[in-house]
Image (spheres, grey):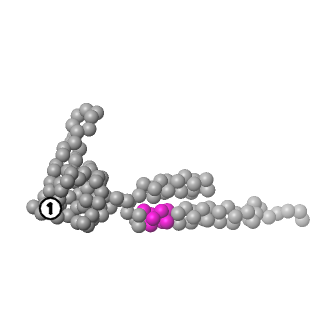
Amino acid sequence: MHFRAWPRLAGGFMMLAAAGCTALKDIPRDQYTAKEKRKDVHVETSDGLVYEFDYVSLRGDSLVGYRRRDVEGDIADYTAVPMPLGDISRMSARGVDWRRTSLIGVGAAAVVVAVGLSASNQNNSGSGSSGGGKGGGVP
């Protein structure tokens, strides 16, 4: 790898780390009403039905989930699915998992440092050698 290529490699790893790793995090039952709106929500009902919503909102003692429908055209069309909060057995929302993201970031930084030190070592070790060629010389 060329010495000048490592900054581009570092930038690529940093962009990946900045995007973050997402994971579904369970929401405790007493926290269902803590936020009025949530994005990327997974809901399981006591009947065994599973829903994936783009976002949900609270209306009194009910949760209304919105899911985008695939339709032709430029205008987004959403389906609304209302359900009582009492019928929900489990709810989780997708969010950034900072533990995974930081592990990836630290790993990427370690790779960048290792590549930089390796390139620096290669540049310094070649300066003391001779040009080679046949010995010969003046008799």
Query: Can see residue 40?
Result: no
Q: Position of residue 66 (x, y in %)?
A: 22, 47
Amino acid on which disc 1 is placed: Gly
Q: Is 58 left or right of 4, judged from the image as shown? A: left
Q: Give the tally of numbered discs.
A: 1
Residue under pointer 1: 86
Judge the density around disc 1: few (<14), some (14-19), many (≥20) Cα neighbours within 10 Å: few
Residue at 85 percent of width and 62 percent of height = 137
**Mark 1: which secondary structure?**
helix
Q: Quadrant of the N terminus?
A: bottom right
Q: Position of residue 116 (x, y in %)?
A: 60, 62
Decide whether the magenta segment is chiefly helix, strand or loop. Answer: helix
Residue at 28 percent of width and 54 percent of height = 36
Q: Which residues are magenta?
A: 101-108
Residue farthest along the front direction in this orientation: 60
Q: Nearer the viewer, residue 38 or 61?
A: 61
Q: Is residue 65 above or below residue 110?
A: above
Q: Position of residue 12 (x, y in %)?
A: 49, 53
